[in-house]
Amino acid sequence: MEKLVINGGKPLFGDIEVSGMKNAALPVILASILIDDKCIIENVPNVSDVALAFEIIQSMGGSVRKINKTTVEIDTRNVTQGIAPYELVRKMRGSYYIVGAELGRFGRGKVGLPGGCDLGVRPIDQHIKGFEALGAEVSIEGGYIEAIANDGLKGSNIYFDAVTVGGTINVMIAAARAKGVTVIENAAREPHIVDLANFLNTCGAKISGAGTDTIKITGVEKLRGCTYAIIPDMIEAGTFMIAAAVTGGKLNIRNVIPKHLESISAKMEEMGIAVEEYDDYVTVYRKKEKLSRINLKTLPYPGFPTDMGPQMCVLMCQAHGVSLLNEGIFSNRFRYVDELRRMGACIKVDDRTAIIEGGQPLSAANLRAVDLRAGAAVVLAGLIATGRTEIEDIHHIERGYDNLVEKLRGVGANIKKVVLPDPATYEKAL
């Protein structure tokens, strides 16, 4: 058992480095199953979800060799289809990409239904629609999803009824080795979808249009291994941008792609925060003491990312006046609000809208990280709260933030991770 302990009230100054994007690394790592070769992946974040993906590949007969701190070699030539352990895949949402990868390589895919953060209903109906359009028969039984294409996958035109990041990724992986041309319409446009397409193209795939709402995939018979670097994590970067603003400090946030941050930068600037863009870093600081209230709705990319909503809520708590935060993606995103209220935040939730009365000072409390981005939010709140904040269930945070404690300590935060005694062992000792 571990927890974070934060003594707040210290502004953050200096340089802070952003790691590779977790949401890009997972599709690339699991898509390597499709490649049937060796791939060297660079700029890999050291987070628990990525470690879990490596463990899954190894359990399927593949090998993962660490070359250095951020580079690994993945060899999937000896992977066996359909044996990904249920106890592993159920811990991670992105595990359903195994179905697309197995389907493209073996003509059939099977994996346990995924886990991840509880953000409300996240159906996989669009994944199924895409697989069926490619010629697969799909069934869900006993906690598993299975897709079988006895006659092989064949290119098709697929229109998603709703924008789906996971569905776009999964169908794109499967279609990369289908016969003929696949066109995905109403596709998601997130940077990690572009990153996956670039990875697959480097391996010999023929994918165009990634980053737009129409993606064209001309299937190829065989893919080859490659060396590929994961893009920087825009959500980690955005979290550090808000850390600079909420603490009243000034941070140079390095190893970023500023274009990916445009929606975040625009809203922060609207509040009175300076975001200076350079080639591969941004500098963030407050231009005025009293931040302006804003209205914000999370939307699919290039809109404001849902994964930045909780962190932005903490910043809104410091604004002058009442701000509105509308969640346009997930139905259960606001569970972190109860944790912020424990610190004195004045927030009301009406369905998918949080009404935030800014200007209320936050005081330290004992808190929980209820999911990954909620965990980032309570860390930010702890950085500005008066007193000593303690945060439990930090395994959620470690799913997506690489070396967070050390990075924040490096720019002046008073934060540490402590190990608690196991309750059973402690009781026995007593």
Image (spheres, rainbow, N blue to C red):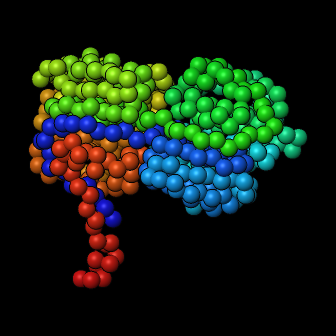
Q: Whole-percent x and y of residue 7?
A: 15, 49
| 60 in relation to 37, above or below | below
Q: Is residue 59 visible?
A: yes
Q: Residue at x 29, y 71 (%)?
A: 421
Left or right for 41, reference 405? right
Q: Whole-percent x and y of residue 273?
A: 22, 21
Q: Is residue 314 visible?
A: no
Q: Residue at x 19, y 31 (%)?
A: 250
| Quadrant placement of the N terminus | bottom left
Q: Residue at x 31, y 61 (%)?
A: 2
Left or right for 321, reference 421? left
Quadrant in the picture for residue 143: bottom right
Quadrant in the picture for residue 97: top right
Residue placed most toward the observer, 143 or 179: 179
Q: Whole-percent x and y of residue 25?
A: 52, 42
Tell me how many marks there are.
0
Residue placed most toward the observer, 389 or 419: 419
Left or right for 191, reference 411? right
Q: Whole-percent x and y of residue 5?
A: 21, 55
| 374 in relation to 351, above or below | below
